[in-house]
Image (cartoon, helix red, strand yellow):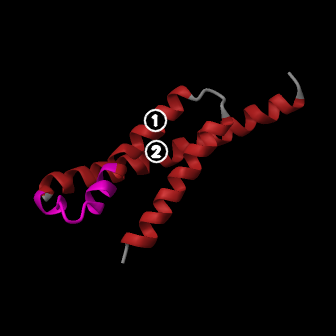
């Protein structure tokens, strides 16, 4: 094994650990949003403004997407990095636009 391959595997392991650290928070967030969405679903879905519904579905899919990537990415550091960066970008976008 070359030094480059060892560094790539180490980087993939670090990304995998970071995604496993983010996963419980994403799952808890999705569970909370699922309960709220099922309780107040009629007011969440409006044809004139679908943005809250789209965000709700994105939050519900987030832990599924993270888990699927962790399960299937093996040591593909690019796929792990894209998933981690996309997750952090989505959370940042949500906080900056929706949290008041």
Residue under pointer 1: 67
Q: Position of residue 63 (x, y in %)?
A: 41, 43
Determine the residue located farthest toward the right in the rendered image.
3
Q: Is residue 30 above or below residue 8?
A: below
Which residue does the image show at 81% across and 30% down from the upper left? 6
Rounded to the nearest angstrom, the CA distance separating label 2 from label 1 is 7 Å
Main secondary structure type of the part rendered in magenta: helix
Q: Position of residue 56 (x, y in %)?
A: 29, 54
Which residue does the image show at 28% across and 48% down from the upper left? 31
Which residue does the image show at 47% across and 40% down from the upper left? 66
Nearer-the-camera pick, 47 or 29: 47
Disc with the residue nearer the chain's start (2 vs 1): 2
Callout 1: SS? helix
Determine the residue located farthest toward the bottom in the rendered image.
100
Answer whether residue 52 is magenta in the image.
yes
Please identify the quadrant where the C terminus is shown: bottom left
Decide if residue 66 is on the left or right side of residue 30.
right
Q: Magenta part of the protein: which range?
A: 42-57
Decide if residue 5 is on the left or right side of residue 69.
right
Q: Are marks 2 and 1 in contact (CB under 8 Å)?
A: yes
Q: Which mark is residue 91?
A: none
Q: Is residue 92 above or below residue 31?
A: below
Instruction: Using the rendered view, name the quadrant where residue 15 is placed.
Output: top right
Q: Position of residue 84 (x, y in %)?
A: 57, 47
Question: Counting other residues with Cα less than 10 Å from the Cα at mark 2, is it few (<14), some (14-19), or many (20 or more)?
Answer: many
Q: Position of residue 46 (x, y in %)?
A: 17, 61
Callout 2: SS? helix
Question: Counting other residues with Cα less than 10 Å from the Cα at mark 1, is it few (<14), some (14-19), or many (20 or more)?
Answer: some
Please identify the quadrant where the N terminus is shown: top right
Q: Viewer-nearest of labels 2 and 1?
A: 1
Q: Which mark is residue 23?
A: 2
């Amino acid at each position: 094994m070359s030094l480059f391959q060892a560094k790539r595997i180490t980087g993939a392991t670090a990304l995998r650990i970071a995604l496993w650290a983010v996963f419980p928070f994403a799952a808890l967030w999705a569970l909370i949003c699922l309960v709220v969405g099922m309780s107040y679903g009629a007011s969440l879905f409006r044809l004139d403004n679908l943005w809250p519904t789209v965000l709700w579905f994105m939050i519900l899919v987030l832990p599924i997407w993270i888990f699927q990537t962790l399960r299937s990415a093996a040591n593909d550091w690019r796929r792990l990095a894209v998933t981690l960066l996309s997750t952090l970008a989505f959370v940042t976008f949500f906080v900056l636009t929706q949290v008041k």
